[in-house]
Image (cartoon, rainbow, N blue to C red):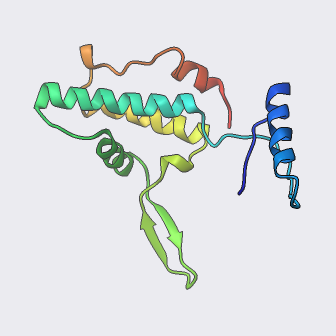
Amino acid sequence: MKRTFKIQGKNSFKFCIEHIKERAPGPLKVTVDDWSDNRSAALNRLMWYWYGQVKKMLFETRGIHVKSEDIHDELVELLLPLDCRTAIDGTQTPQRARTSKMTNKELRGYLELLEHHCVESLNMTGEYTLINPEDLKYKALQDEA
């Protein structure tokens, strides 16, 4: 069983050591790396929060029932370029971009496109303006990937 620990202080370090001691009967491979998140949890929460706002606006103004996951899929396909996957034989297959693989900087760029699209194309203004909670967007915008 592979375990990854984020060591931020004495308590997390102690937890990691205790886990190693429990597994001591067999040989273990221990690798130490600098911790880096592909993207911040705050940016991820903001993205899904905005999809919830789009969902609410579509229902209240147009009577459209849609899942947040479907909004995500459609807007990613609309706003982001296709990725290409190269097979062993060298052929390339276009595929939808994946926000889960984005760095903080890439996800911030996507959120800027999303915000612009919601205002310009979906007319999300007034009571439907996307909310930018202080703890989600602005703190996360300072994080660099």
Q: Is residue 82 left or right of residue 69?
A: right
Q: Is residue 105 left or right of residue 58?
A: right
In the figure, 111 relative to 85: above or below? above
Residue drawn at x 55%, y 81% is 90
Q: Is residue 22 left or right of residue 94?
A: right
Which residue occupies the extreme bottom position in the image? 89
Residue 88: image x %, image y %? 58, 82
Q: Quadrant of the N terminus?
A: bottom right
In the figure, 66 relative to 122: above or below? below
Q: Which quarter of the figure has residue 53?
A: top left
Residue drawn at x 54%, y 17% is 135
Q: Quadrant of the C terminus?
A: top right
- Please tell me which residue lies in front, 31 or 68: 31
Residue 32: image x %, image y %? 86, 47
Which residue occupies the extreme left position in the image? 63
Residue 76: image x %, image y %? 39, 47
- Please tell me which residue lies in front, 42 or 4: 4
Q: Is residue 9 visible?
A: no
Q: How many marks?
A: 0
Q: Is residue 31 left or right of residue 51?
A: right
Residue drawn at x 17%, y 37% is 65
Q: Is residue 135 visible?
A: yes
- Please tell me which residue lies in front, 105 or 44: 44
- Please tell me which residue lies in front, 7 or 22: 22
Q: Which quarter of the figure has residue 141?
A: top right
Residue 27: image x %, image y %? 88, 61
